[in-house]
Image: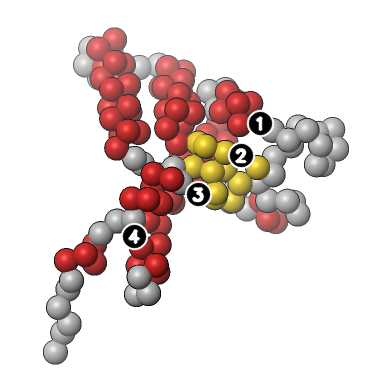
Amino acid sequence: MSNPMLFNTLKVDTAAINEGRAVPFPGADKVTKIVPEVTVRGYTDDFINARNAARRALADKYDGDWQSAPNEEVRQMNARLLKDHIVTGISGLFNGPGPEENPVTLEQFTAALADPVYAKYADICWQAAAKVTQDAEKQRAEAEGN
């Protein structure tokens, strides 16, 4: 005999999405003793609304198709979205010259996200935000002891 499914089983932990959490850079533990972490929110309503508005603005410029915009404009749009809605902190990343000297600031990090030279950092931020969003269900279940 099967157990009935409870209504709140599919409830998402929106607190985890809205407040965010620190996510380690993937693979960094194999390279360095201090693992860099980016603190990110998940895909909040504010983020989705801002993303939709930004895409509409690009679509208005490019015959109704935001995806036909030049890549540099899309990268700038995405960097603004990361800065304004997703990334809230950075730790364990340094400017040097020594291995733990001159920590990278949040302002420095988010400004770099628009630069194609630092595209991997933007990718890490998007992956981290997706992870926070996807893990919200798992965190809720663990908090309830399921």
Whether the residues at callouts 1 and 2 have beta carbons within 8 Å, the answer is yes
Q: Earlier in the sequence, mark 3 or mark 2?
A: 3
Q: Secondary structure at mark 1?
A: loop
Residue 137's tag is: 4
Residue at the image point whose x is 84% and y is 33% from the top:
97
| Vertical position of residue 45 compared to residue 35: above or below | above
The residue that label 2 is drawn on is 90
The answer to whether marks 2 and 4 mark residues whose Cβ atoms lie closer than 8 Å is no
Please state which amino acid type lies under the numbered disc 2: Ile
144, above or below 70, in the image: below
The local secondary structure at tag 4 comes to helix
Alpha-carbon span between mark 3 and mark 2: 11 Å
Residue bearing mark 3: 21
Whether residue 49 sits left or right of residue 82 in the image: it is left
Please identify the residue farthest to the bottom as the structure is shown.
Answer: 1
First in sequence: mark 3 vs mark 4: 3
Mark positioned earlier in the residue sequence (3 or 1): 3
Which one is earlier in the sequence, the residue at label 2 or at label 4? Answer: 2
Q: CA distance from mark 1 to mark 4?
A: 31 Å
**Residue for point 21% across, 16% down:** 64
